[in-house]
Amino acid sequence: MPYSKIYEVLGKLEEKGWIESDGSRPTKFYPRSPATALEAMKVRMEREMRDAESTIVGELMPLYDKSGVKEKPEIWVLRGLHNILAKVREVILGCEKELLVALPAIAEGVSKQMQPLLRQLREKGVRITILASESTSSEVIKALSRVAEVRLKDSMFGGGVISDGRQVILLLASERMGNEPLAILAEHTGLAGFAREYFNYLWKEARDIE
């Protein structure tokens, strides 16, 4: 390998902070402490990231704003118990960190189908919080408390599931729909965040199980 190529490689290593030179002739190179070199590389990468972020925000955001394109939340209406349960199962199984469940009295029967799924999440280390209706049977409450933190709340008119603060299923009651169950599925962090805040508000007013 020619000396020019060797010095080129050494120069790049010095530029990146992995070695240093003494300025003598011929130049002598010395390795730097790996910890020091890594810290220097971290600082350099953070600076480059800030520069890139500034460029993107400064140049692309004005173009995006002029285009008139707005973020559109993905929302679906689910009809029928079978379709709702299938989507609830999918959302629960996809949860990785936190699952919030509001369980009205009308959905007590569904809780038995959810319990095996909740046990799987618990084994994965997912934090599960369940807000149940005061009228929920003690048997169901006892079973749920084995896999989740449970509190009781009266006057629950609806229910739902919030997964990782990004997916939410809201169970609705509609007189016009008769007895057909109806739910809304949203995959949008803003909407899920709003639902999570409302859940936490109800949670603070709920009572602990005895």
Image (cartoon, rainbow, N blue to C red):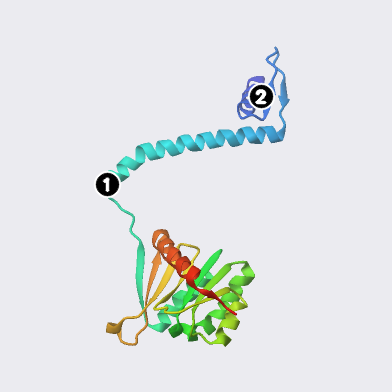
Quarter-of-image position of residue 168: bottom left
> Measured along the vertical axis of the image, is residue 153 above or below residue 189?
below
Q: Is residue 104 among what the camera can see?
A: yes
Residue drawn at the location 51% of the way across and 82% of the way down: 111
Residue toward you, 111 or 60: 111
Q: Give residue 107's quadrant in the image.
A: bottom left
Disc 2, SS: helix
User: What is the x, y in percent for residue 56?
Assistant: 40, 39
Residue at the spot x=62%, y=66% of the render? Answer: 125
**Position in image of residue 109 (x %, y %):** 49, 86
Element on which disc 1 rests = helix
Side of 60 where 89 appears, left or right: right
Q: How many marks?
A: 2
Tag 1: amino acid: Ser
Residue farthest to the top?
25
For label 1, the residue is 67
The three-letter code of the residue at mark 2 reads Ile
**Residue 60 location, x and y as percent?**
35, 40
Q: Residue at x 71, y 35 (%)?
A: 34
Indicate which disc, 1 or 2, sits on the residue closer to the N terminus.
2
- Quick check: 170 above or below 113? above
Question: How much space separates mark 1 and mark 2, taking CA atoms?
Answer: 50 Å
Checking the image for residue 3, the label placed there is: none
Query: Viewer-proximal residue, 162 or 151?
Result: 151
Q: Residue at x 51, y 34 (%)?
A: 48
The residue at which mark 2 appears reads as 6
Which quadrant does the N terminus fall into? top right
